[in-house]
Each structure stands twice: as C-alpha cells, then as structure tokens.
Image (tube, rainbow, N blue to C red):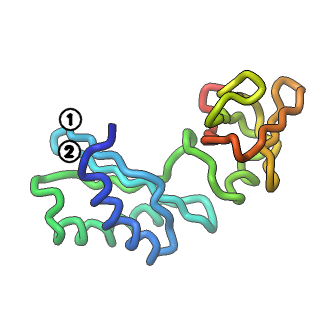
Amino acid sequence: MAHPLIPKILDLATPVADALGFRVVGAVFHTNQHPPILRIDISNPDRDTSLEDCEQMSRALEPILDADEILPDAYVLEVSSPGISRVLTSDREFVSFKGFPVIVTTSEPYAGQQEWTGQLIGRDETTIHLNQKGRAIAIPRDRIAKVQLNEKR
C-alpha cells in the first residue's frame, strides 16, 4: 500500500519533471529507514534516463519539497530511473525492449490465462505480440492491464 503522502508528493514532483522534459513514473516513501527515504522514479522520453537527469530532477525538486514542508522531519531524496522491472507504456519502450522477456497481465482471462510470459515481438494498434517458446501469441490490447519487463526470465 502506498504511503498517504505519495499523491501530494506526485502533485509537487510532476510539474517539476514536466518542466525538465521528464516523466514521473512513480514514488515510494520508505518510512522504515532512518532517516526515511523518498524515492522518485523518472524517465526521459527522448533517451535512456541518465545519472545527470536524476541529479537535475533532484536539485529542482528538493527545494520545492522543503518549501512545502510536506515532509516535516529529515529525509533522504533519491531520484532514479525505474530500472529493469518497469512497466512498458510508450511506443518507444515497446520498440527499445523488442526481444526482451516480458510478463503481460490481462484485466480478465484471455484464452484461459490472465498472465502471459514470453519475448516481446512488438505491438500494433490492436495487439501485443509475444514469442512464447517459438510460438507466436497475439493478445488484444483492450484486454491488457500491464506489460512489464521480466527480470527472472
């Protein structure tokens, strides 16, 4: 379950990211750490997210979070890219990760399954295409809840 401050944090972080040309992918507040760690994941829609992108977002966001006093105690701000376990959403990501192992989750069972694993072949306007051990699988996009890179292979 997400920390109750996450929606407010995202409200503050999203316009900062937009102004810098980034997209906020998610946020997590680890309150079990001392000091707590606020991690904001960003992506650069034009290229792979770099360390410089993360530093730029961190420098721009930190004074805004501090001025808003949403986090009254000491905390550590971490800005990072979403990493390999991320959910694919943009056309660019579907092109970049062609051939990578993915997990496709459907909103309701399709052909008797709600979760599909395989190598990403691609997507078009209506379908996600997978290679599942040499067998081509086509899953309608209107049934798909998410497509996520599969770290486990």
- Residue at image position (18%, 66%) is 66
Residue 109 versus residue 91 in the image, above or below: above
Give how far apart the Cα atoms at labels 1 and 2 are. 6 Å
Q: Quadrant of residue 77?
A: bottom left
Q: What residue type is labelled 1?
A: Asn
Residue at the far front in the pictured view: 108
Q: Which of 94 and 3 is in front in this view?
A: 3
- Residue at image position (61%, 26%) is 152
Residue 80 versus residue 107 in the image, above or below: below
Q: Residue 70 carries which label?
A: none
Q: Which amino acid does label 2 sit on?
A: Pro
**Residue labelled with disc 2:** 36
Would you say the residues marked 1 and 2 are in contact, meaning their CB atoms lie under 8 Å apart?
Answer: yes
Q: Which of 76 and 110 is in front in this view?
A: 110
Residue 12 versus residue 125 in the image, above or below: below
The image shows residue 65 at horizontal and vertical percentages of 23, 65
- Residue at image position (54%, 59%) is 49
Question: Would residue 37 appear left or right of 55 to someone viewing this image?
Answer: left
**Residue labelled with disc 1:** 32
Count the marks: how many?
2
What is the secondary structure assignment of the residue under circle 1?
loop
